[in-house]
Amino acid sequence: MLYPLKFKPRVKERIWGGSAILKKKGKAVSRLPKDRLYGESWDLSSVKGDISVVANGMLKGNNLQELIEVYMGDLVGEENFERYGLEFPLLVKYLDCNDRLSVQVHPDDALAEERHNSFGKTEAWYVVDCKPGAAIYLGFKNLELTREEYIAAVAESRLEELLNRVEVHPGDVFFIPAGTVHALGAGIEVVEVQQTSDVTYRIYDWDRVDSEGKSRELHTALAVDAIDFEADADLLHKRYMLNSGGEATVIRSPYFTMKLHDVAQSKALDRSMLDTFIIYICLNGSLRIIADGQEESLAEGELVLVPAQVCDVELHGDGRLMEVYVANE
């Protein structure tokens, strides 16, 4: 019988990373060297070479793809299984941005399929914590910027002056459709939810070099065709101040739905009509989740995957929870 599933985090060294992930993930990453820069924890993934492995219960040691192969629609939902097969449709990460990330863009589904036999990458960020004055870069200041003006600015090393800088606060949510130029700034920790894709076009890396004095590869030419110069400028950017026990749907897109719940003591959720897996992520506090009578605890930063066959979910404790799933049409 399926139950709420936890997974082993897959931690990645990054030139822009820090030490927060070691603290956030605790015992799960206790064997990692303490003197490295860790920028990403892939907490739920079906990316080839980085498929998540179950960390709890009778299925411990099995990877996510193996589970989908055996349980199919019972795990991910019938329509999701028909559409995605053995590939889980979402990738969830925890990012510690001790320094600025590169300025980048991701292709949409059509371009990613053509070039990489991959899905595109639409994503969202939830700001868990940040230093005062921390900011991201999202789109361009000039909403009428043309392809030709962009190419000229890149050639003349003027890209930074075109970028739209947005100061962030804990609790902010940003929706980043494929084709949007973006970068996370320094001093920010985020939960990132995205389509399952590892295709990134790096446009600018702040003239940064590694310990050997080498610059990272840029993908300037590839990026031009991926940028959506006619994108809707009204990107989702809201800070949700929920009342105790409140909830809000913050993103509803073809790729995923994201909700936030503030839990005080207990809360019951009926998910019988969804026919989809549900990912629950504890953003702060500590919680217990009971799914069809089976219980699992969630500490801050932990994630659990609730199978599609589960109908009733109870939340107990005190904290904020993110709920993510792929809604069926």
Image: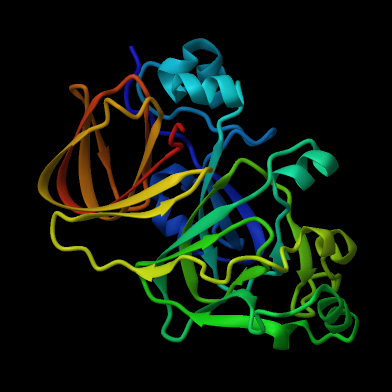
Residue 30 seen in the figure: yes
Tally of numbered discs:
0
Q: Taking 231 as reference, is 68 left or right?
A: left
- Split into 4 quadrants, where in the image is the N terminus? top left
Which of these two is toward me, 312 or 135?
A: 312
Residue 63 seen in the figure: no
How far across and down, in percent of the image, does residue 55 sit? 42, 30
How far across and down, in percent of the image, does residue 98 sit? 55, 72
Which of these two is toward me, 47 or 33?
A: 47
Q: Is residue 128 above or below residue 295?
A: below
Query: What's the colour scheme?
Result: rainbow
Q: Taking 70 as reference, is 266 left or right?
A: left
Q: Residue at x 85, y 79 (%)?
A: 154
Q: Is residue 126 above or below residue 27?
A: below
How far across and down, in percent of the image, does residue 199 sit? 73, 49
Which of these two is toward me, 162 or 143?
A: 143
Q: Taking 282 as reference, is 212 left or right?
A: right
Snapshot quadrant of residue 84: top right
Q: Residue at x 82, y 66 (%)?
A: 216
Q: Is residue 327 above or below residue 155?
A: above
Q: Residue at x 27, y 31 (%)?
A: 271
Q: Residue at x 44, y 22 (%)?
A: 77
Snapshot quadrant of residue 306: top left
Which of these two is toward me, 77 or 15?
A: 77
Q: Farthest residue toward the left?
A: 265
